[in-house]
Amino acid sequence: MTHMPRPGAIAAAPDHSPDAAPDRHAGIYRYDDLDREFVFQRVAQFREQVRRRLSGALTEDEFKPLRLMNGVYLQLHAYMLRVAIPYGMLGTTQLRRLAEIGRRWDRGYGHFTTRQNIQFNWPALVDVPDMLHALAEVDMHAIQTSGNCIRNVTTDHFCGAAADEIVDPRVHAEILRQWSTLHPEFSFLPRKFKIAISGTPQDRAAVRTHDIGLIATRDAAGAVGFTVYVGGGQGRSPFLAVKAREFVPEADLLAYLEAVLRVYNQYGRRDNIYKARIKILVHELGAEAFLRRVEEEFARLPRGAHALDPALVEAIRAHFAPPPLERLPERSPAFDLARARNAAFARWTRSNLHPHRQPGHAIATVSLKPVGGIPGDITSDQMEALADLADRFSFGEVRVSHEQNLVLAHVRKDELYALWQGLEAIGLGTANAGLVSDIIACPGLDYCALANTRSIPIAQAIATRFADLDRQHAIGELRIKISGCINACGHHHVGHIGILGVDKKGEEFYQLLLGGDPGPQAELAEITGPGFDAAGIVDAVETVVRTYLDLRGEGERFIDTLRRLGHAPFKEALHGAA
Amino acid sequence: MLVKAKGDLQAVSASRLRDGVAVWLSAGHRWMEDVADAGAFTGAALQQALAVAQADSAAGLVVDVYPLDVAVADGRTRPLHVRERMKARGPSVRPDLGKQAVTPAISRAPERAA
């Protein structure tokens, strides 16, 4: 029974203390006063910089690096503000604030990115200081979302919940965030620098496509350490990172990474933007010579001064204490009954759930890829409604995945049906996680000043072609990734099917790649042959899928069939026999 | 400037400093929000238009000045390259947003001091 106040009675004031907040158990790092003061100071600095730019006291050449340090780009139609979401973790207080910002200063929506950040596409420069102030009020900012610095550290969107996890990577992602923030040596690197960390060998963070990739693990004695990969990246020259060390002890993590970055800072090219990433340095020096320099630098570093203090690690770990999950039986009769009664719900559970380490719970992926929608886009109304669902079903926590979806990580199985109904009601219940319509797509020429072609309409056309969810489920796991230019923000190099937009005499054209994989068996995709126009690329994807369905063995995913048979049958289907 | 202009007829584009909105220089050297109103320049007139635009950039009215290839039909200027057509319209996937969604508000274009 609901208790309503009596007419005329004064209702008790709502409890706004942090202990009463619905997201008090969200797995996010909580600012202290020093953090908060720093972020507000930064907002005040930028407000003054904007004022000086508008007054003419700063030229664009002087102002541009300042705005980029605060996440402000100039895009095709307007400015764009990219907001940092550390390792993709959000509390619902923060998500609601993002909704408010989208509504008040943008056009009522935001766009989640492959760096687990969010972008607003329409802010006026004069409003950005107010937007940053509103973010600072909920412990958020846009620092290091641009510029030649260490960008947002990304991680497994199932961290701290997945049954296959060995180490919760958020602890070390946060340590890396604090270490890299305004690090004086690493604020003006030769080029931007991206780090990803996974807490399981079932790499869901694409670590080998990063400048530094880390797999957190434990040695035989149970001590935490990291397998370190260096020199990966996509863009016009894609490389998978090479293994630098099998096991770097936790205490030496910062020292080892500092050694890698020092070598990069010293030897990385600054004369040519296209050759400035660490992947080029590793490639041009050779992995062996590069790693020898790293080891020499590592040996020179005063290890005591760089060692991670176990007390500090524990203090950070406390921020990511698991929420108070109930002890439940693994099987949920209510869940089983709902699956039996509702085929659409059963379909969603097959594609959008992942095993949770706690019996009776599941991790739910919230698809931001409705058929015909824009991958990664979410309206302010949807953000607020999802925040309500997260408060109700997942401890007030929402994660952003690098696949441009959202995740509710701690849902009781017996509440999944109610959650799905809530998601369906706001257009976020699509049962396509990991399937052919769950497409990563960069903003492309619809928004981006650097793009050559559009990406989003291609994603929409493919999703529409495969709109039948039963057919998608019958096809099974198939990862399509689309980039509108060679910068590869849509990760086309590691798509099972990758699509790259190219400019052909001022018109849009698309190359088809096959065989990429960002995961534990990381591979780069290969171009199949001549490209296609916008209509032709959709037909080409259909051809590839039909070829796979004709050739697949029992239980084989698309990528398995491709690995078994090679590219030849697919190329022949696309382009005819050579 | 991502796409190099090389045609006989060129317009001059920029973004307004305060809000980033795309604008084009008219034949009379006023900044317009609708590319159809852009001047189509050639030869010395193009150099003069670029000089005006760069002066406005230095004065803090606009940023990111560059020339683009255009054609003119029925008195309306049209960009030739797909990138510039996108910039002129707004996102093709959100017809409710950008210039395609609103009547050009020329009065909101930046103005030079007299």
Image: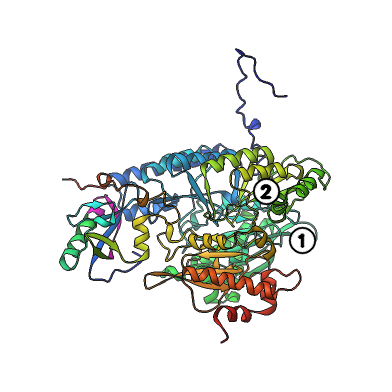
Assess whether residue B64 is covered by the magenta stretch: yes
Chain letter of disc 1 in the image: A
Q: Is residue A77 left or right of residue A217?
A: left
In the rendered view, tell whether residue A242 sits above or below residue B56.
below
Q: Quadrant of the N terminus of chain A?
A: top right
Q: Is A282 or A501 nearer to us in this picture?
A: A501
Q: Residue at x 67, y 71 (%)?
A: A549
Q: Image quadrant for the C terminus of chain A? A: bottom right
Name above or below for residue A177 compared with residue A131.
below
In-front residue for pair A72/A254: A72
Give the residue type that dot 2 points to.
Val
Residue A302 seen in the figure: no
- Residue A330's place in the image compared with B45, above or below, is above
Q: Which residue is mark 2?
A: A313
Task: Tell me, yes or no, whether dots 1 and 2 are on the same chain.
Answer: yes
How far apart are the alpha carbons under marks 1 and 2?
Answer: 18 Å
